[in-house]
Amino acid sequence: MTKNLDSGGLKSIAENYDLFYIDLWGVMHNGIKLHEGAIFTLKKILENDKNFVLLTNAPRPIQPVKEFLEKMGMEKEFRDKVFTSGEAALNYLKKFYPLKKFYHIGPPRDFDLFNDFKDNKSKDINESQYLLCTGLFDDYDQDLNYYKNLLENHIEKKMICTNPDLIVDKGNERELCAGSVAMVFEKMGGKVVYFGKPYPEVYNQSIDNNNKKILSIGDNLNTDIKGANLLNYDSLLISNGVHKNEIKNYGIEKVSKQYESIVNFMQSDLKW
């Protein structure tokens, strides 16, 4: 049974945890502006001698995400606690794929992740040894059939996906993410290596989380909450995120069951 924290706030349970994994997009901001209540919550967590990681499935290195948050007005003490799926993927690529040719699927703005590998980028998918998916091409950001046609002759290649999210809401607009392309590839029989929530690697790279009581906070049942479930962390779902309409229409118990996830707590928006 999911407990609603809208009246009691996060403060009603915060003392039970040592570490909080907190999602960025959908919890701390909506892609356009910061949520003031969520920022206040970060201040209170630190005041209570607790720690947190702003863990995001952004397919970018940490530094560009920090710069994005700085432009929004987030304070440095909070920005310094960011860790991204892109950073986790970058560490993996440096170790296992330092010289192999890749084909990049995603917008040009994501390419700062791969500056160290720019000489390995192939403009022709036929000449690549693996596929690097950070999102959708700007000209085909709604057309998943385009990727089915693009990839049909490359099923034998491995795809590295740096953002397992299927969708994200930017303000009032819904956008497809890299996970949607990876799902198309998997359904065709391709093999995908994912970096980001819900997969353990991104949590374990971000901070020393051994022997800590952890609460994972996010708005996505497929990533934030599923990740918490897989790692045996408690979970807090922000209901005014990507599942807002589903929860409004069917209720949290039915929706969480549909996504095969366990939601311990729920809040409309993150508030102390």
Image (cartoon, rainbow, N blue to C red):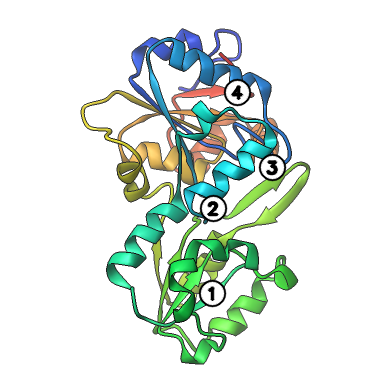
Residue 125 vertical position relative to residue 170 in the rendered view, above or below: below
Inspect the image, locate mark 3, and give the three-letter code of the amino acid beneath it: Gly
Q: Secondary structure at mark 4?
A: helix
Residue 106 is situated, as x and y percent measured from the top left of the image, at: 60, 68
> Which badge, 1 or 4, is on the more N-terminal residue?
4
Q: CA distance from mark 1 to mark 4?
A: 34 Å
Residue 212 position by quadrant: top left
The residue labelled by disc 1 is 104
The amino acid beneath tag 1 is: His
Q: Residue at x 57, y 55 (%)?
A: 166
Depth check, mark 3 against mark 2: the one in front is 3
Q: Which residue is mark 3?
A: 31
Q: Which residue is mark 4?
A: 38
Mark 1 or mark 2, whichever is nearer to me = 1
The quarter in which the N terminus is drawn is: top left
Q: Farthest right residue?
A: 172
Give the spatial CA distance, label 1 vs label 2: 18 Å
Given the image, on which type of amino acid does mark 2 rest? Answer: Asp
Front one among 241 and 66: 66
Q: Residue 165 bears which disc, if any?
A: 2
- Find residue 124 and report its horizontal and vertical position in percent: 55, 89
Residue 70 percent coordinates (x, y): 63, 37
Mark 3–mark 1 Cα distance, whole angstroms, equals: 24 Å
